[in-house]
Each structure stands twice: as C-alpha cells, then as structure tokens.
Amino acid sequence: MPRMLDVSDEVRAEIGDEEAERLLTGDDAPRSYDCTSCRTPGDPETDRTSTVLFVGEETAVLAFAHAGCIPSQVVTVSEEQLQGAVRSITGDGPAGGNAPQNVPGGQAVLGITSGLVLIGGELHPALVVEPTAPIARPGTTGPGDDFLPLLIEQGFIPVTDTAELPSPLAGWSVLLAAGQLHAVLQPGAEGGGQVAWWQAHQALSVTDGWRAAVNKTQRVLIYAAPVGSIGQQPREDLLRDALDKAAAGGKLVAASMPLAGTSGA
C-alpha cells in the first residue's frame, strides 16, 4: 500500500473520489515511476510522492513526482504540450534544442537556451532569452527596442556582474514537466493566476546535469538580452563569455525564480 502518496484536493476534484481512493489504496498507483520533474526514479512505497494531473483541451494525463520536487497539483497546458509530455513520459519525445516562441502581436520570436552558470563555485541552472528582432512597446510601432525596459518594469534587474546571483522575482516561475521545459510563467492581471510569458511550441529538452542542478537549487536563473547580444553559442563557456560581454555593455537583465508549484524558499 503506497502510504506516502499525496492526492491534493484539486487533483481529487478532477479525477473523482473513486479514482483517488484507488490510487491511495494502491490499486492504480505505480510500483515505481520516473519523477515528472527531475526524471529520477521514485517508489511510492518508500518516497513521498505527489500525483500531478496535466490537463489539456481534450486530454488529461496523471503523472507522479517526488513530493520534494513538486507538490500534488493540476497543471493546465495546451493540448500540443500535453501530447509532447506524453511522448516524453513514454520515451518517444524528440530531442530538444533552442525553443522559439512568438511574442504577443507577432513582433518577434523569443529564443530560449538552457545552460549551467557557475556562480560562487556552484552550478546553477539558467535560461537565456533573446528575441529574433527588436521588441516594441505594446501600442507603439517605433523602431526602438524596449525589450529590456519592459522586463525591468516587470522586476528584472540589470546585470553588471555575472558572478553575482540574480535577485528572486516574486510571482514568476518555471514550468518543468516530464523532465522538459514547458513555460516561463508570470503573474496574471489583477491578481489572477499565473499566465505564460514564454511557452514552448514543443517542450524543450534539458541535459541531465541541468535537471540535477535544478533539483538541487529548486530555482532557475533567467537572463535576457536584446536581439544580437548573445547569439547561438555551441558551448556553455562561450555562452558565459557572451553573457559577460552583454553585461559589460549594459545589455543584460536577470532574475531567479522557483519551479512552478514550489515555494522557492
């Protein structure tokens, strides 16, 4: 009997009391699983385990995670994302790389790249965001690039020294599911729930080292720079060099944020 399985009230409301009880008594619970967050093995008999329900437009998938990685919750994703998560869970997912996302209004595409950044002798999981074109302020058509000012208004901090850990940004988080990157979430309007600031068209694969680092720190560092500042760097040392140059030129902002569903404490 998986005594260490947690089914939250919101998951229970979605799957029904009967299915929830079948999970808690072990009838429908797995004997073992790969954590949907960190992708390392788990056993509901010996590990505190969360039930995580991914809900799309037409499909819902129940997954399992270490309770230390993510609490039991319902995660709403697009149907395309959910199908990608299913492929990832079953081992049929494609290898990921740089994942673009259209900016609202169709002005540009945000490219996002994962990497590890060494700060204070410790490796930190990081995401580097760079648009493919200048970002105009909503409601304007001018030739200027307001990408960094817009992010600073949201709480991102200009980076002058990449050896310093970026400050936490309240209300933002990173959605990592089935061991892949799905979205960067920001606070909704007027105190509503989180909404996607960046959302992958196809879930972005990250390395085992990146997952291990985020499982340790429970936080992700987000660096952002204007178009042409970073570029596609084939190695993490070159990526760090590009970040250093962007910071020296006053073209880099950053923030740290927890995984979605965690306190980030």
Image (cartoon, rainbow, N blue to C red):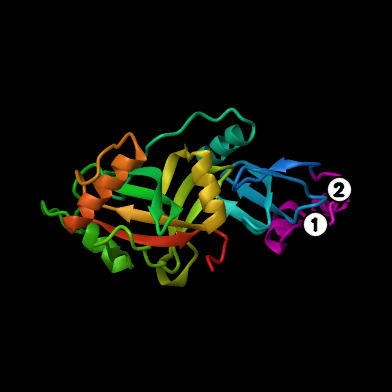
Q: What residue type is labelled 2?
A: Gly
Q: Mark 2 points at which residue?
A: 26
Category of crowding for the residue at label 2, using alpha-carbon neighbours closer than 10 angstroms: few (below 14), some (14–19), many (at least 20): some
Q: Where is residue 118 in the image (x, y as percent from the top left)?
A: 39, 52
Q: In which quarter of the image is residue 92?
A: top right
User: Residue 110 in magenta?
Assistant: no
Which residue is at 54% across, 35% downward?
Answer: 84
The magenta span reads: 1-29
Q: Distance between the residues labelled 2 and 1?
A: 11 Å
- Please give left or right for residue 192 compared with residue 149 in the image: right
Residue 181 at least partly seen: yes
Front residue of 78 and 85: 85
Contact, mark 2 vs mark 1 (Cβ under 8 Å):
no
User: Residue 13 in magenta?
Assistant: yes
Which residue is at 58% across, 53% downward?
Answer: 75
Which residue is at 54% across, 69% downward?
Answer: 265
Question: Is residue 81 shown above or below 75?
Answer: above
Q: Position of residue 158 (x, y in %)?
A: 26, 64
Q: Which amino acid does label 1 sit on?
A: Met
